[in-house]
């Protein structure tokens, strides 16, 4: 989880996509991605995450 500041100004709490593969630091640029969040009763739920670029 991370607090992401959007270009428009607001800050949101969001999941990061594969954060363990990168060294994270405050101020790093991120990119919006649409990913699977979880699966429940055979139905896949999708949502947004952010990937460090």
Image (cartoon, rainbow, N blue to C red):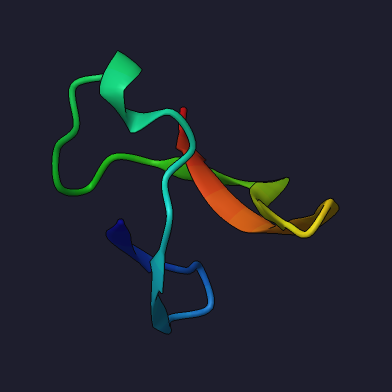
28 sits to left or right of 38: left
- Most extreme residue toward the right is 43
* Residue 24 relative to residue 14: left or right: left
Q: Position of residue 43 (x, y in %)?
A: 85, 57
Q: Residue furthest top?
A: 21
Pick the front one: 32 or 46: 46
Residue at the bottom extreme of this rendering: 10
Image position of 29 with respect to 4: above or below = above
Give the quarter of the image for residue 52. Answer: top left
Q: Residue at x 45, y 43 (%)?
A: 30
Residue sitting at 43 percent across and 55 percent down? 15
Q: Position of residue 19 (x, y in %)?
A: 34, 31
x then y, percent, for residue 31: 56, 43
Q: Nearer the viewer, residue 23 or 38?
A: 38
Q: How many marks?
A: 0
Please indicate whether residue 29 sits to the left or right of residue 2 in the image.
Answer: right
Residue 6 screen position, x and y as percent: 47, 69
Give the farthest residue toward the front. Answer: 41
Q: As displayed, is residue 45 above or below residue 11?
A: above
Q: Is residue 48 above or below residue 19?
A: below
Question: Residue at coordinates 51% horizontally, 47% vertically from top-left?
Answer: 50
Residue name at image x 78 percent, y 59 percent: 41
Relative vertical location of residue 12 with respect to residue 26 in this rendering, above or below? below
Quarter containing the N terminus: bottom left
């Amino acid at each position: 989880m991370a607090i992401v500041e959007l270009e428009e100004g607001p800050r949101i709490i969001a999941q990061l996509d594969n954060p363990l593969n990168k060294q994270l630091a405050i101020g790093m640029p991120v990119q919006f991605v649409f990913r699977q969040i979880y699966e429940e009763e055979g139905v896949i739920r999708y949502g947004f995450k952010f990937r460090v670029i």
